[in-house]
Image: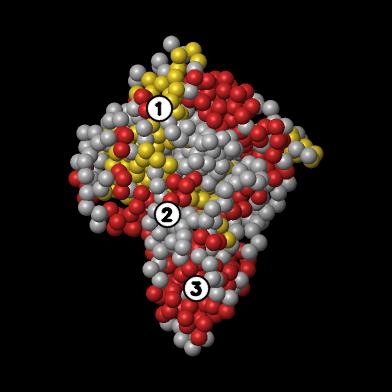
Amino acid sequence: MTSETYRDAFGIPHLRAADIHALARAQGRVTALDRAWQLEVERHRAQGTSASFLGPGEVPWDVLARRARLADTARRCFAALERRDPETARWVRSYADGVNEGLPAGARRAPEFARTALTPGRWGPWTPLAVWLSTHLLFAGFPAKLWREQAIRHLGPDAVGLFATDGPGTAGSNGWLLSGARTATGLPLLAGDPHRFIEDPGVYQQIRLACPEFDAVGLAVPGVPGLPHFGHAGAVAWGITNAMADYQDLYRERLRRAGSSVEALGPDGRWHPAHTHTETLEVAGEAPVEVEVVETERGPVIAGGPEASYDPEGADGGALALRYPPRVTEDLGFSALLGLLRARNVTDVDRALDAWAEPVNVVQAADTDGGTLHRVAGRVPLRARANRLHPVPAWRPGHDWHGWHEMPYAAVPDGIAVMANQRGPAAPLGVEFAPPHRADRIRDLLDTGGRWSAGEMAAIHTDTHLASAAPLLGHLTALDGLTPAATRLRESLLAWDRRMAADSTDAARYAALRGAVVQLLAAQPVFAPLTEPPAYPEALRPWLALVPRIGFALEHLLRAEELYGIDRPALIRQALEAVAAELPTGTWSDTHRLAPWGALPGGLATPGLAGDHDCVLCTSAVPGLTDRAARGPAARWVWDLADRDASRWVVPFGADGVPGSPHHHDQLPLWLGGELAPVVTDWNRLTPDRTLEHPA
């Protein structure tokens, strides 16, 4: 028997095979054909070898990947998976085999290989785990602990709450669930949109996976088998949002050399041997870089080393060790993936998620019996509160891990559950959460809409109301003695509907005022010590930059009863007068443009956008720094439990990662216009792709 590949009108692959292993092989093969360049970039990033063909700009990431021991952790996790769950291990191996089968043809299609003189490599069975680990290493935002440490040191402990927000490097999502009592069909609806850095090709792959055991459509992570985040298996469907949980710790280490070895000072007051070895990092066009890899009993040292200095209190400098759950448990949670595909109801989904590890997510699920599920899934260690706030000294007792949190569950009150990274069921597990604006807005819209259908969900996805504008606009009302130009600008902004619409000049002017206020705040002397972040690895710097921190915390800074003696009315007056003197004449989308990431420069679409960071349409600019948006909805999806063919989905670009191919950017107009493509499940409406047939 052969595994079969079909395509819909958007080139989305629909696969069916005789069993789960043939299907995984087919998934790997079709992904390699459509996304060969993306897969190889991700494999090299996971191994810390991307600079070998992308050049010196990738050295900071490669150094972090090597020092954090991502590839070694993935190998250990796969070896443990073979012992604990051989069926899933074989399934993952089949996926990697399929990737290897498809890579030669995929590389011939992708011009980037010739451009960089890259030859496709070989995927090991552990490589999908390495890709997963690499993709999510920074998801929990552990570098924010470095920022908090500096903020506490210079501004005091109240700075933690004052600057709390989902910062510039943290991924979020919108997700909502409607029970049958809230829908036109009487059966549940699920919808959402993950907010990630927008990449070309995209970070999610629309796909269908069918075999005698299951038939599921959803969004795959290229390089990883199954549908880990978003899927509709006919009788049951699921989706996730980032729980904003804190499950990674940083330890300040005191290291010393002892001959050819390295020792670390432990909490027992004794020096203990640390693992150490040196790796060579190849760099295209430049000399190789030697990387010393050190690992203590806490974890891999990702910054500093035995020669790094530290102050007596260990509050700055020195070496930093990262402790993260898969390195401790040798478990990435892949045993959940087959369980999700095989699920027939929310009880099955719930049971599968008991094996989930990271990233920690809030999961919503529903089934055709009307059942619903709203829970947190993942692994969060029990430890001292100080661990969650900032780096802690490894040489002092009281900072070890001692078990795991039980994952919280939540109800679905009034038939609606909304998660948008705000404080909710995961509140006991985290420190910083998103402001409640997106979640409140989604719930308000759903509450006023009567009984909803799948086709009406796009109106929720694309809402542009900006509730977080209220504090700045409120300050404007108290200003007097303004120049005529500033008075006109103020009155225009106070009359504005607070929608960050693409064609809105008022939205553009509000953004200009907001940016000016952020810049003036960042220039205040009280924040001067935070303008030069400590000498941490370059890959961690987005979390340490002052202007983005102020930009994303602006609402809190303007609402605080007192702000370090800063005269905020005078500052806002100055910003208003400056913007009025050079009044923006364009619309919001003239400057608010998509800035997607690609491994190679050039050729990426930069269309104008609606939305903003705290809108449901979350297209994140960085106030005070740029109006361009690197983050936004990496997909939009709607799962209809009454009729799977009424479900909808869209990605920012297309199903095919090959530039110039018909399905490379054919979904971009839909994504920009807030439209969704239909989910097609009738095999007779699909086109066979004979090039991918392969013996099972």
Residue located farthest toward the right when viewing the structure as drawn? 287
Residue located farthest toward the top when viewing the structure as drawn? 1
Please say if 107 is above or below 425. above
Question: As shown in the figure, which amino acid type bears the numbered disc 2?
Answer: Leu
**Which residue occupies 45% across, 35% down?**
10
**Which residue occupies 35% across, 29% down?**
681
Disc 1 versus disc 3: distance between alpha carbons?
61 Å
**Which residue occupies 47% across, 42% down?**
667
**Where in the figure is residue 460, as x and y percent of width and height?**
35, 52
The answer to which quarter of the image holds residue 527 is: bottom right
Disc 2 versus disc 1: distance between alpha carbons?
32 Å
> Is residue 241 left or right of 131 when viewed as pictured?
left
Residue under numbered circle 1: 686
Camera-side residue: 14 or 96?
Answer: 14
Q: Secondary structure at mark 1?
A: loop
What label does residue 617 carry, if any?
A: 2
Residue under numbered circle 3: 563
Q: Secondary structure at mark 2?
A: loop
Camera-side residue: 39 or 258?
Answer: 39
What label does residue 547 carry, if any?
A: none
Camera-side residue: 310 or 388?
Answer: 388
